[in-house]
Amino acid sequence: MEPQATNPSGAVPMQPSSRPTFLMCPPRHYEVNYVINPWMAGNVHRSSRQQATQQWEELRKALGEYAQVELVEPQPGSPDMVFTANAGLVRNGIVALASFQHKERQGEEPHFRRWFSESGFAVRDIPRVTPFEGEGDALFEADGSRLWAGYGLRTREASHKQLTELWGVEVVSLRLVDPRFYHLDTCFCPLSNGDVMYFPGAFDDGSLRKIEERYCRAKRICVSEEDALLFACNAVNVGRTILLNEISQELCVRLESRGFQIIQVELTEFLKAGGAAKCLVLRLDN
Ligand code: ARG
């Protein structure tokens, strides 16, 4: 048998899996009890933990058909920890750990740090002065060739430089201008076939130009404001499968006509905190 590699902390790296791997966090302590984005306003203490648990379980089960799912233990006092996409950004066994802008979420950082180091990842810190909210604001092109990174509402643009240095990958910075779409993964989704699904209204003109320069017209799937507000762009894409909240029939047909299989999971309880399918998972094997 091959000896197992260990990192300096003695942790055993996760076994490479032929299936994509994602991190999720059970909603045992999930609730809306502060307001750090427009979705949460009016929803404080208005979510049902029981319904949230059912919806989360359904997403986990659906995703489990296509991917391996790892779990991190939820922590009291960190209700948004379910949104693991914000824990950090992973590539080649290295995680750039999130440095949250709001103190309400900074308490999640040590828990995610512990999970990553115990799971064998090399942890890199992003300084507090340049907030970085993980994969919520940084999405790799499906072929890994570049990193699309959001800034302006949560993540600070200066943190992008550190991502470039960390992985030596081209980083394309996109400025977010609509507070309802405060993380890049709420309005932008690179897909496995080289298409991109996005809501143009969430970006400034310069950023739209960057998107249009890198994706020809035929590769761009523009989403209506109505679908964007249903978190259509907050989609988890595994191969030809796309998992997302319930969206319009029109968009569903459009995506199917491009060869995708669409799996809709009702995630209304998480919309109350400003998140849906993609926010609830973090890719671990980029
Ligand atoms: N309430 C959370 C926040 O405002 C929701 C995070 C959603 N996550 C995401 N990747 N878009 O930070």
Image (spheres, rainbow, N blue to C red):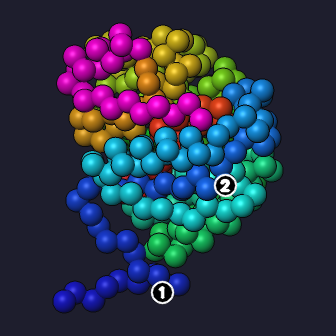
Q: Amino acid at mark 1?
A: Gly
Q: Quadrant of residue 52?
A: top right
State which tag comes first along the sequence, 1 or 2: 1
Instruction: Decide: is 60 above or below 253.
Output: below
Q: Is residue 222 visible?
A: yes
| Mark 1 secondary-structure assignment | loop
Q: Which residue is mark 2?
A: 29
Task: Where is residue 75? Give x, y as percent.
Answer: 67, 62
* Disc on res. 10: 1
Q: Quadrant of residue 155?
A: top right
Task: Where is residue 229? Give x, y as percent.
Answer: 56, 19
Q: Is residue 173 visible?
A: no
* Quadrant of the frame with the N terminus: bottom left
Residue drawn at (29%, 67%) of the image = 16
Q: Amino acid at mark 2?
A: His
Magenta-highlighted residues: 248-269
| Mark 2 secondary-structure assignment | loop
Of badges 1 and 2, nearer the viewer stands 2
The answer to whether residue 252 is magenta is yes
Rounded to the nearest angstrom, the CA distance separating label 1 from label 2 is 30 Å
Q: What crowding class fits label 1: few (fewer than 14 Cα within 10 Å), some (14-19), or many (20 or more)?
A: few
